[in-house]
Image (cartoon, rainbow, N blue to C red):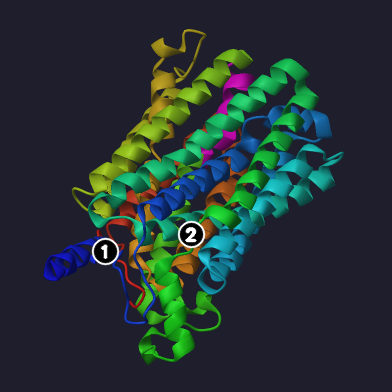
Amino acid sequence: MRELNKTAHALKERPRPGGRGEGSSAGTSTYYTRKEIRFILAFALLGTLFDGAELNLIGFPLAYISDSLHVSTIALITVATVQGFASILGGFVFGTLGDTLGRRRTFAISVLAFGVAATLGGLASNYEMFLLTRVLAGIGMGGLFGLSFSMFTECWQTKKRGTMGGIIQSMYFVGEILTAGLTYLFLSVLGHDLGWRAGYVTIGLISLVIGAASLKLLPESKQWLAYQEHRKNGTLPPELRRSKVPMIDIFRPRFAYGTVLFMILSTAMFLTTNSVGAYLSTYLLKTQQLSLDAVSLIVLLGYVSTIITYSATGLVSDRIRRKYAFTAACVFGTVGFVWFLALLSSGHAQITGAFWTSQGFWALMMCAGGAGGFGVLGVWMSEFFPTRIRSTGSSASYYVGRGLGAGVFPLFALTLAGTVPFALALGIIGPVAGVVFSVLAPDRTGRTIAELE
């Protein structure tokens, strides 16, 4: 009977796939209970959701914010540019904190920061105050992507990591749908000025609740804790020691090539999605003269298209490789933008109330889905970087892309194109760049995550 009990115990303690073993050489358990995995997954989903909700707070109600603050559309695009640069700073700051202070506490600080920013943004009385709240929001958002995918990758089984990663990333657009839905509701009920403000405050307060809850409920990364114990005990091999400033490590010879390529790929995806996100509503409202109801529905369908391609790309990446799934998504987006650009050039891009009969509508749906590479990018990067610098590498790569693609590009595109429709069509640069550079990027699809790598 004693031997039988020992055997049963051994089976119970057997390491699980994906780096979820019961113990480590440091003596710290790297086993995740089902409850811990559920909480990590829940907060990864929520973090990505509110990341999307926060970023869309400018794009969807842009015309109404412009009227309330008595500034031009280009002035608010400038706000998006400044916010994008702030997110680069946030990516480096919160990425570093995630690897030094821990995933859990850094996640909470990040969510709380942009929750405060959204709330104050809704109360802003002038352009300057609004700009400051967007800077804070950009910095706060800088931690969410890298932290969410670092925590998720460290606890999830390898064979289905891409599939669930695509679902997590699709929550970004669920967040955008949430923002669009709440803003539409408040605009309809409260009017244009109070409507967008109520949307900001609501998103901000919900984010504050999520941030506070994560301090209590979100488990810390077991691999990170095990690595910290190695550092404390002085048992780290010299080649696996992290510097005091992890951002230096991501540019060391072993990782610099991958870091730079992931920054380029992230920029490409933000070029793709923000050409649609920044200009679609304005294009439909101002150029096509559609009603708010029709515009809201088309924007919603664009989000649905993107969610589908995010999830599909993640699923496919488990069957082929991350890079090839990413490339396929970029090819899909390239076709959509070429179609839309051709319609614009020939004067056949008109969209009426019966939008489903318009070629322009279907081309725009393909453009919206062209950012499907995002569905695999988070897992792809997290598998490349080791535990000691995973948060820094993922956050820095992603938010440099956001700063350039979501910040600089919308302003550059409008200046270069001269009109909103052609600024939207310039998003073709994103998927084309994604096709070119994805084939050059390193790929460690499905590897097991450990504390020492």
Using the numbered discs, state the Cα–Cα distance from disc 2 to disc 1 in whole angstroms: 26 Å
- Image coordinates of residue 256 in percent, x first then y, are 41, 74
Please tell me the numbered disc located at residue 444: 1
Residue 426 at least partly seen: no
74 with respect to 318 (left or right): right
- Image coordinates of residue 147 in percent, x first then y, are 49, 59
Of mark 2 and mark 1, the one earlier in the sequence is 2
77 with respect to 446 (left or right): right
- Image coordinates of residue 309 in percent, x first then y, are 35, 36
Q: Amino acid at mark 1?
A: Arg
100 with respect to 308 (left or right): right
- Disc 1 element: loop
Residue 446 at least partly seen: yes
Q: Which residue is mark 2?
A: 219
Residue 225's quadrant in the figure? bottom left
User: Closest to the observer: 266 or 138?
Assistant: 138
Q: Nearer the viewer, mark 2 or mark 1?
A: 2
Is disc 2 in contact with disc 1, using a CB cutoff of under 8 Å? no
Please tell me the numbered disc located at residue 4: none
Task: Kindly identify the residue that appears in the image at 46 percent across and 50 percent down.
Answer: 39
Q: Amino acid at mark 2?
A: Pro
